Image (cartoon, rainbow, N blue to C red):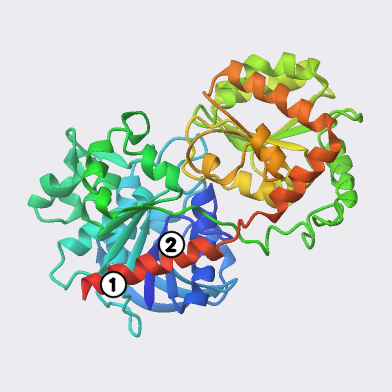
Amino acid sequence: MKVLSVASELYPLIKTGGLADVAGALPLALVAHAIETKTLIPGYPAVMKAIKKPKKVHQFDNLLGEHVTLLEVKHDGLDILVLDCPALYERSGGPYVDGNARDYPDNWKRFAVLSKAGAEIAAGVLPGFEPDLVHVHDWQGALTPVYMRYAEAPEKPSLMTIHNIAFQGQFFAELFPYLELPPHAYNEALEYYGTLSYLKSGLVTAHAVSTVSPSYAEEILTHEFGMGLEGLIAGRSDNLYGIVNGIDVEVWNPASDDLLASNYSATTLKKRPANKAALVKRFGLDTDDGPLFCVISRLTWQKGLDLLNEIVDEFVESGARLAILGSGDSAIEASLQAAASRHRGRVGMVLGYDEKLSHLMQAGADVILVPSRFEPCGLTQLYALRYGCIPLVARTGGLADTVIDANEAAISAGVATGIQFAPVTADALRRAIRRTIRLYEDQKLWSQMQKQGMKSDVSWDRSAALYADLYQRLVSKGQ
């Protein structure tokens, strides 16, 4: 089977979050199921710099008014199609925002062009490659099935994956004529309370919808988590699937990870403390026997990181230490930086994102905090399980699906892998931290939880099989 994947980011070329990891890992995992995937991404500066000797395979002379070159290249085992269009993608900021964290005003066009190109490739514009199915990711690729629906060519099966329904790609309705869609597409697919919603359009037109965990698939049917689209999604519930993400267990392998101070496995956990010592030194923290917590996250309300400011003083008084890596909301950043200044030696912070440092943190910290208010899947806790870093997570979405709470029954059965808490409030988080510290004091139990977590299957194997089965059903249905 041949599949076209349309994504706005792709690890290892360009990454702002978990979408990139999924878009990069899933095609490799699907090879075992005889599925050939080509992934279409924009030609951001980082992408154009990284790819070597790309081949020009097509020229779009007028793609929504833009001159666009389609390049093909192999990179780290991935088959990649790159849209080379400097007018749209050659920017000094990130993929979606400028250096001042403001959305690019032409994002509507940047990702409409991506989607339009995806639909053209689906229709067979690329010599030698006509996909059997098109898999699009989030709002940035969501117009692809729309263009496919309203094209004159026969429509191919399509799958729309929601990585985070909070990001919907909403734009002014006045932009609709520039999308070069028939007038009736506005009311049938794109209109959303007087605006355009790219995500909504993909949910309406794709043949099936998936999310990145079974729990999140249920949550987005509710008013609390559906972000205004719960009614539409409920109408598509017969074609809604929740498939939990996996991780690349070759990249994330504590036994061979060259970014660590010391490699180790579940049978050689005695080698792990060398990473803790390196992490303590990197963040300028005190050396003592207390537990070391870490945060590796976007610092946003969604991630629940505003709650840390309410509990950090009591947290430090408990004897624990905290290492924070992340950036995001300026108010949350400022409050955590103030906490680090107030509690030197107990709280350390590195502002921004550092892939190499994140590996050391997973290998060196005792606990990773993931207090998200909602979390479609989450990958951080999967990395943590793999590295023997106990996840302390909110009971929501993929966090609830992947971490087994250390309640009495789970401890007795020897299956506990972490700590869950609910609701997402400062008081509940405070209680969960106290419970975690008590568990840490029993080092025999703690070691058992680490080993159990490291035994968890966090690979793409099972999830790739589920995707392969879903692809096959969609293709068979379309024949």
Residue 355 visible, this orientation = no
Quadrant containing the C terminus is bottom left
Residue 41 - label: 2
From what the image shows, is residue 414 above or below residue 323? below
Image point (61%, 25%), residue name: 333
- 37 horizontally vs 371: left or right: left
Amino acid type, label 2: Ile
Mark 1 lies on a secondary structure that is helix
Image point (27%, 61%), residue name: 116
Q: Residues within 10 Å of mark 1 (few under 14, many from 20)?
A: some
Quadrant containing the N terminus is bottom left
Residue 108 visible, this orientation = yes
Place residue 468 in its image quadrant. Answer: bottom left
- Residue that protrudes farthest toward the left in the picture: 184
Mark 1 lies on residue: 475
Residue 119 x/y as whole percent: 27, 66
Q: Looking at the image, which is closer to me, 411 or 295?
A: 411
Residue 25 x/y as whole percent: 54, 63
Place residue 392 in its image quadrant. Answer: top right
Q: Looking at the image, which is closer to me, 52 or 309?
A: 309
Amino acid type, label 1: Val
Mark 1–mark 2 contact, CB under 8 Å?
A: no
Q: Tag 2 or tag 1, which sits nearer the N-term? A: 2
Mark 2 lies on a secondary structure that is strand
Residue 388 x/y as whole percent: 75, 47
From what the image shows, is residue 364 above or below residue 42? above
Q: Looking at the image, which is closer to me, 258 or 87?
A: 258
From what the image shows, is residue 4 above or below residue 164? below
Residue 339 x/y as whole percent: 72, 19
Numbered disc in front, either 1 or 2 = 1
Q: Residues within 10 Å of mark 2 (few under 14, many from 20)?
A: many
From what the image shows, is residue 53 above or below residue 310? below
